[in-house]
Amino acid sequence: MTRARARARTRRARVVETLMRIVTGGAAALIVLSAFGLLGYLLVRGLPSISWVFLTAMPKLGGIFPAIVGTFWLTAGTAVFSLPIGIAAGIYLSEYAPRSRRTRFIRLSIANMAGVPSIVYGLFGLAVFVMLFGFKVSILSGALTLACLTLPVIITTTEEALRQVPQDLRQASLALGATRWRTIYKVVLPAAAPGIVTGSILGLSRASGETAPVLFTAVFFSAPLPTSPFDKVMALPYHIYIMATQPNHPQPGIVWGSALVLVAGVTVINIVAAAWRSRARRRVTW
Amino acid sequence: MGEPRRKLTGSGRTGRARATETVVRTIIASSGWVAIVILTAIAIFLGTNAWPALSSPVAGLWRMLTGTAWYSTATPPEFGFLPYIVSTLRVTGVALAIAVPIGIAAAVFISEFAGRRIKEISKSIIEFMAAVPSVVYGLMGVYVVGPAVKDLLHLTSALTALSAGIVLAFMALPTIVSISEDAMHAVPSDLRMGSLALGNTRWQTAYKVIVPAAGSGIFASVMLGMGRAIGETMVVLMVAGGTMDLTWSLTASARPLTAVIASEMGEVVQGGLHYSALFVIGLTLFVITFAANLAADLVLERQRRRWRR
């Protein structure tokens, strides 16, 4: 190859380099900008509707209080069912499970559970909790359905958080005569707590925004405030869906206000959790 | 003398600790099975509820999969859901056509070109996008994307397969970007350093070394993104329009499988043939997404084994 041709090649490579930097950077910028666009649009359309009355009044007076309460109870119920089992399963996978075909199979099932469409969880909840168990359309049925959907997130994040705890800590505890469970309970779990809590909050906040799974298991459009776990409820995502698709009385103010409340709630909780995790990580050192 | 006795009954603290250990181990080990139990239960209950339609002379799997008419209230009723399958394909096709190139390009940028700060910031923004509830994406489709597409292409309706697909693309993007980026990040840096040391530019390295090495992870990210798009309900329910016609046109409205279940389950007689037919659609969705996830998982596992030294 002559020198001129080599130089031409180098120059071409440099041009392509710059070009691809711009193209790939443009793709990343497009994603980032659309996220900001989404947030900005939500703020612009939603903020004017936000008021004390909007947050605390019944729908007749233009408020969304029952929807907020319903989403709160659904999420709390989801936490009650999914956290103990999910964290226990995470502990099993990280601390007890042997490296075997069976464990591999369990992991495969968890990954597959995460990919099952949310509407299919809705059908499952309808068939099992609403019909077979006779819980009717209620907070209980909805929370159980959402718990199934949230479990894979909680299991995976718990396992990951536990795996990040160094082996030395476990061995030191075992060497002092602690049993396996005491080691997990007193040493490993506290060290992994920040990761577990943040992951669980992420999973639960995702559950709180789900509509399809609660469509036939928990929600009812103008349900009153619930008095027991067997009551139907309103929920923010469902309220948004119904209000947005009503052909006769469109009320964009309520729709965008509710959407802003939902997204702000989810985002703020996640940011707080992430901030707390990074602080807690700094405190626990190894 | 004391040794064997203590082993048998356990005494005081040690015995109690041992008993606790056994109980706790049993509880935790049984929780480990929860995923298998639930997944099996889903398959069983979808199957048993779908069975009346599958075994009925007016429906049946083959007739339903290939039939083009869905008249649930006619006598005899028709439950052919081919138009809905085609709707799902149209919407998912649009979503992937947009999300795959943009997603992989963005992943290359974040993994190979971006500095640490930009990397962190874009990762947390993508995390935010994944946390936004689907009904909010549906809203954006109804109020922003749909009307924009309508004006741009001079359509008569804002609710089309195209606009639903565009919105779905934004929902699939976080999955595709983060999993592809993870895969590129996991490529041993020896390969990257070696390529750069030979005089390759960063793009040549990315294109000729990193992307091929991370190929299976990128494939998995596309599979998972596709699973998300196929299974998404609220966006297609709100944005796709909901016509029953069998058409491949992207600017026509669509009624994907998930939307059929969500819009009709509220008004069926529970236990009836229509109810059962909706479970057949649910079972179809379950099988399709299961296959996509399985493919992704097997490929990811292979890659993990390859990079584990």
Image: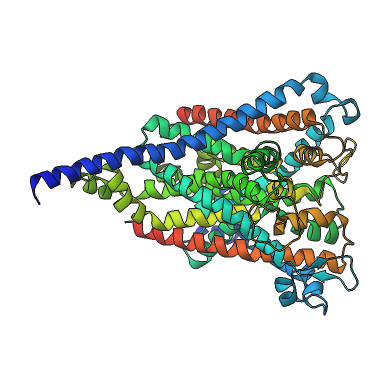
- Answer above or below: position of B70 versus A69: below
Residue sitting farthest toward the left: A2
- Answer above or below: position of B23 versus B130: below
Q: Residue A182, how many percent across, how many down?
A: 54, 45
Q: What colouring does the structure picture have?
A: rainbow
Q: Which of B50 and B154 is in front in this view?
A: B154
Q: Residue B2, how many percent across, how many down?
A: 52, 58
Q: Which of A143 and A213 is in front in this view?
A: A213
Task: Report the residue at 48% width, 63% height from top.
Answer: B298
Residue sitting farthest toward the bottom: B57
Q: Residue B180, how many percent across, how many down?
A: 44, 49
Q: Is residue A280 left or right of residue A144?
A: left
Q: In this view, does B203 lie to the left or right of B60?
A: left
Q: Which of A221 and A36 is in front in this view?
A: A36
- Answer above or below: position of A146 versus A227: below
Does the rendering let one see residue A139? yes
Q: Nearer the viewer, residue B119 or A206?
A: B119
Q: Count every numbered label the image shows and give the total.
A: 0
Where is residue A60, by image quadrant?
top right
Does the rendering let one see residue B28? no
Image quadrant where one finds the C terminus of chain B:
bottom left
Q: Residue B67, how many percent across, how many down?
A: 74, 72
